[in-house]
């Protein structure tokens, strides 16, 4: 299988290195800048609890160099997806599967949901440009339940977790999901084949849509966010709104916010990915985490004042610090 990783950062680098080491796929990557230079010079480098894994890297900045792929894994930040979706056209042939390993609500999420009339989410796919560049028939849904960081360009450290959930956007089993699952399992991932990937996506979103932006705004680690009773209850209020929206679109949540807080508390004083982005002066991906939830609530008629407030505060914070686009 020919596999191309688009975005050789923490998650993309982890997936690429494991696939390359396993040796059951022809792995390539699209990268740029210092990461591109590092990979060309040193190949894939991944540190983990057992030591270090290395493998040669085939990497380029130009998708035309690689041609059509069997699987394209998109592992970038959501704000970059609009331009990337158009740029990777040379990688996508009639049988290519595209699997976004990204946070938040994906561009294809509303397709074929009657309550939403299948109109693209303007918050993450303005004008439906991404949907046209990557049609739904190519998509394999993915939820990432692991953490990794880049210690230097092209050098990845696996922090925790090992699970990938993948599935068809339409639900149910398929041969193509089973084939991708087998490839990822051979590379050392714990892979779950989901019969309802939308629900899995919404559940992860429900768990991190508050902690990420609150930590980014305040600079607090997760333990401090949960230790403040007022902030903890505000997070719970946002999660209750998201659960109500999820119930309206066929993605019910069976836990309470407090159930989730107790799981998060076990992770201790961790710095969320959005807090790390703020500290590194990288753009923050608010639209896929919060903007899409606000838009979905409006479209299905579920009030979400606390979610709107959190989105507004986080968006203003991002604009003041040059990490989120100014209003047109």
Image: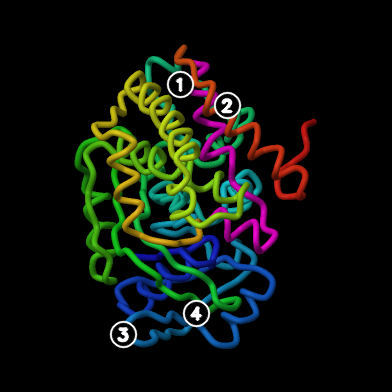
Tell me the CA gap for discs 3 and 4: 21 Å
In percent of width and height, residue 103 lies at 47, 48
Residue closer to the observer: 172 or 267: 267
Disc ID at residue 57: 4
Residue 85 in the image: state x and y as whole percent: 58, 47
| Above or below 63: residue 43 | below
Mark before the other along the chain sequence, 2 or 1: 1
Residue 19 x/y as whole percent:
36, 72
Q: CA distance from mark 2 to mark 1?
A: 23 Å
Q: Earlier in the sequence, mark 3 or mark 1?
A: 3
Mark 2, residue position: 308
Nearer to us of marks 3 and 1 is: 3
- Magenta segment range? 273-299
Mark 3 vs 2, N-terminal side: 3
Tell me the SS state at disc 3.
Answer: loop
Q: CA distance from mark 2 to mark 4?
A: 43 Å
Where residue 244 appears, as percent x and y from the top left, is 37, 22
- Between label 3 and label 2, give the one nearer the viewer: 2
Specify the label residue 50 is tagged with.
Answer: 3
297 in relation to 223, above or below: above
Q: Along the line of sight, which residue is nearer the eye, 305 or 205? A: 305
Q: Which of the two marks, 2 or 4, is nearer to us in this view? A: 2
**Looking at the image, is mark 2 or mark 4 earlier in the sequence?**
4
Separation (CA) of disc 3 from disc 1: 46 Å
In the image, 279 versus 290, the foreground residue is 279
Which quadrant of the figure contains the C terminus?
Answer: top right
- Residue 288 colored in magenta in the image: yes
Q: Earlier in the sequence, mark 3 or mark 4?
A: 3
Say which element carries label 2.
helix
């Amino acid at each position: 299988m020919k596999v191309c990783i688009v975005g050789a950062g923490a998650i993309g680098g982890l997936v690429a290195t494991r696939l390359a080491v396993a040796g059951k796929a022809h792995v390539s990557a699209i990268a740029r800048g210092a990461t591109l230079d590092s990979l060309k010079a040193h190949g894939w480098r991944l540190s983990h609890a057992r030591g270090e894994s290395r493998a040669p890297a085939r990497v380029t900045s130009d998708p035309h160099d690689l041609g059509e792929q069997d699987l394209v894994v998109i592992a970038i930040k959501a704000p970059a997806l609009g331009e990337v979706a158009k740029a990777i056209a040379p990688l996508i042939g009639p049988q290519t599967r595209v699997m976004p390993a990204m946070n938040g609500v994906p561009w294809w999420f509303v397709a074929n949901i009657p309550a939403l009339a299948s109109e693209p989410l303007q918050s993450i796919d303005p004008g439906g440009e991404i949907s046209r560049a990557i049609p739904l028939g190519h998509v394999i849904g993915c939820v990432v339940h692991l953490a990794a960081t880049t210690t230097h360009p092209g050098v990845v450290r696996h922090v925790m977790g090992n699970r990938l959930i993948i599935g068809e956007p339409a639900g149910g089993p398929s041969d193509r999901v089973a084939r991708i699952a087998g490839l990822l399992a051979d590379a050392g991932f714990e892979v779950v084949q989901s019969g309802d990937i939308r629900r899995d996506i919404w559940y992860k979103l429900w768990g991190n849509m508050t902690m990420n932006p609150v930590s980014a705004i305040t600079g607090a680690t997760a333990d401090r966010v949960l230790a403040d009773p007022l902030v903890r209850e505000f997070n719970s209020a946002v999660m209750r709104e998201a659960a109500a929206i999820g119930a309206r679109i066929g993605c019910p949540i069976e836990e309470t916010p407090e159930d989730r807080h107790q799981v998060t508390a076990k992770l201790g004083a961790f710095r969320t990915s959005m807090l790390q982005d703020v500290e590194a002066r990288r753009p923050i991906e608010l639209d896929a985490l919060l903007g899409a939830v606000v838009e979905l609530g409006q479209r299905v008629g579920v009030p979400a004042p606390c979610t709107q407030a959190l989105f507004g505060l986080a968006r203003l914070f991002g604009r003041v610090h040059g990490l989120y686009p100014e209003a047109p």
